[in-house]
Amino acid sequence: MALSFPDGAVRVTPIDGIDDPDALSLAAILDADHLDSALAASYVLDLDWLVSHLHPRTRLTLIADQIQHATTDPSSYAVVDPELPQPNVQLVHSKLLLLFYPQHMRLVVSTANLAPDEWSLVHNCIYLHDFPRDATRVFAANRFSLELAQALHDLSVPFDIIASMNHVDFARATAVRVVTSVPSAVDARRPRRNANMPSYGMLRLAQVLAPEPASNEIEFVPDARLLCVGSSMGRLDANWLRDFYLCAHARDPRVWTLEERAQLVADDLVDVAVAFHTQSQVEDNRGGVQAAGYVNCARSIIDARGFPQSSLFKLVPRTDHMLVHAKAIVARLGEQQRHGWLYVGSHNFTPAAWGRLHQNAQPYINNYEFGLVLSPVLFECREINCITAVRWNRQLVPLPFEPVWHPYKRDDKPYCSRE
């Protein structure tokens, strides 16, 4: 059987009542009639809704921070609980599916939780990749398969599921890398039991973008322009934006002191656009109050001293008067800004997701997160602030938002869902 996504592909979630050729429903992704087993990870997971898409014979393993509407027979699924050093504070925010069929495995990395509204009411992004599977063969591991296995170990996925990937051929995963976050241990004297990657969060991003060791050359020329999309606003400040900006250039900020980093990249050179919905966008959205619940920001964050108000940009949805729940980073590099990379996954653009550096040590990370960096990406531009097409791996990349740089106007305010 021919694979639908042999080289990987990006799609968007459907919106009820809108015909979108780039949209894929959960039912189409699961292809339940042929599905043997599935691993499903989600921050919020509507169990009854998910199970309604599956054949009763399908073996199901769940990872979730919150499982809702769980009237399904508990003997029909298994639940995995990843390690949380601070269970009342830290959380599991990863969103992915591993789908095992007789002759292939499908990896799905989504910005949508496994809940019905997020597949019908708000815009989300999906990455899919089909890999050949042969239970009679053991395929050689490559960089991607090792990264995926390490990430699954971090999530405490049962060994038999990870071991089954030995029979999967990942050879065509060459233009994609795994970026994860894992909650930090609170007490350095009591380290985490499971921490399999050498780095996580923003430091993992820096590592993925440059396999070579980070340079400490003071002659650093920033040339990246970032559009950072999320549905939750974090406690941002100039130092955090600068640290992330350095990581986006494949530099480890810990090489320099805080003062040296400020000298290296002045505040006005940190080219980071934080794309977030405005108050008027949320008030005028077609999904009403129900859709508005998927945009999260506290007024105390926006009003905090040091919050980078000038970095706020309007998040323009793919469809007028709809809201975006996606988490993505569009990175444009070089003088012409026509090449770069794209991040898609569960990370909101927040310190809780990507980590915050403390005294040049390992960053503190609050969440489990899972995402992918697609590179190289080519951009077609009508003008410097407007990308007309995104291409990766010889194919167009549909996004649930417009990759445009629109600063907030004088009367624009970020939507605040609570005080």
Image (cartoon, rainbow, N blue to C red):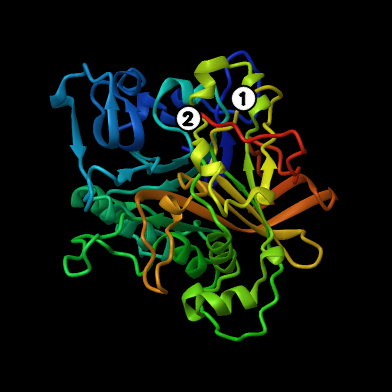
| Amino acid type, callout 1 | Val
Q: Position of residue 225 (x, y in %)?
A: 70, 59
Q: Is residue 165 left or right of residue 399?
A: left
Whole-percent x, y for residue 71 in the image: 21, 16
Residue closer to the observer: 197 or 244:
244
- Write the residue at 54% across / 62% down: 244
The residue lying at 23 percent from left, 50 percent from top is: 86
Residue that carries the numbered disc 2 in the rendered image: 418
In this rendering, the answer to whether 12 lies above or below 155 is above
User: Which quadrant of the view contains residue 151?
Assistant: bottom left
Q: Nearer the viewer, residue 35 or 79?
A: 79
Residue 37 appears in the figure:
no
Q: CA distance from mark 1 to mark 2?
A: 14 Å
User: In this rendering, would 395 be left or right of 156?
Assistant: right
- Disc number placed over residue 282 in the picture, else none: 1
Few, some or many residues within 10 Å of mark 2 (<14, 14–19, 20+): few
> With respect to residue 59, does 84 lie above or below?
below
Nearest the viewer among 78 and 291 is: 291
Q: Residue at x 77, y 38 (%)?
A: 410
Q: Residue at x 24, y 42 (%)?
A: 88
- Picture coordinates of residue 23, whole percent (x, y): 59, 28
